[in-house]
Image: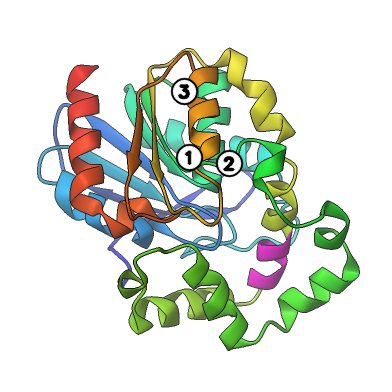
Amino acid sequence: MDFPGRLVTTASGIRVFVVDEGTGDDTVVFIHGYALSHISFRFQIEHFRNSRRVIAIDLPGFGESDRPKRFSYDWFDYLHVLCEVLSELTPDPFHLVGHSMGGALSMLISSAGRQPVKSMALIAPYVFSHSFQMPRALIGSSFMKFGMKHIPRALFDRFMRVAYARKSVLTRNLLDYYWEKAERPGSHSALHGALKTLSRPSAITSALPDIRVPSTVIWGDLDAMVPVRHARVLAERLGDAPLHVIEGAGHCVHEEYPDEVNSILEKWWDSI
């Protein structure tokens, strides 16, 4: 199911899987959400590689990237790795598209000013502390760490289904794909570490005033992971960024309604 790609090795020895397809005047970089991989952007990769250079990155701990033992999975470790990989891949300005956790990381990248980000499209990102429903004390506990190592398949599937309002999009093959990734050595620590990071988005909220790149926000009105009311707050905090709310869509709006999202992205990039 994975797209063809290659591993980019960072200075610290972490191998990051990258899909790099298509050619064109524009380069677009996609960063996926928690527990997902580049495959969540399959409809965007297939569509935009015909007219643009498309780069999709598997975050450390997920997809085909390494699950390093000494990686903390916090915001700034991710930022360091992503900036290193992006510097290796392209010196030219690029459009950044981030979903969920990847949206939060996109904001961190843009605010840091280390990369030539041309524009940013945020798809239901985690950004405000009240976005996360689970108590932090529970997330950081030994009980939760143990639970991540022994999560039943049925519970994993149930968690994944919460992210989709259109349940038919999350096929059995796709569930099997994500389960296989989640069962690889080191994945349980990655899932737990990244979950702890998601529960502490203050670094992202603090970065908002430093974002200077043109930004747009995309959300599903039935998002059960990050409520759509946060979309309006985020758009305002980004200087009244254009906001697109898609009816009938859940957290993975770009998978559930790919044609609509692709049209929004294309018009957005053409306007920059």
Alpha carbon distance from label 3 to label 2 = 12 Å
| Residue 145 against residue 19 in the figure, above or below | below
Residue sitting at 59 percent across and 42 percent down?
A: 126
**Label 2 crowd bin: few (<14), some (14–19), many (20+), radius 10 Å:** many
Q: The magenta stretch spans which residues? A: 186-192
Residue indicated by mark 1: 85
Residue sitting at 47 percent across and 43 percent down?
A: 124
Q: Secondary structure at mark 2?
A: helix
- Residue 186 seen: no
Residue indicated by mark 2: 81
Tell me the kind of residue under disc 2: Val
> Comparing marks 1 and 3, which lies closer to the viewer?
3
Does residue 33 appear left or right of residue 91 in this picture?
A: right
Residue sitting at 58 percent across and 29 percent down?
A: 108
Q: Secondary structure at mark 3?
A: loop
Alpha carbon distance from label 2 to label 1 = 6 Å
Tell me where residue 164 appears, x and y as whole percent.
42, 64
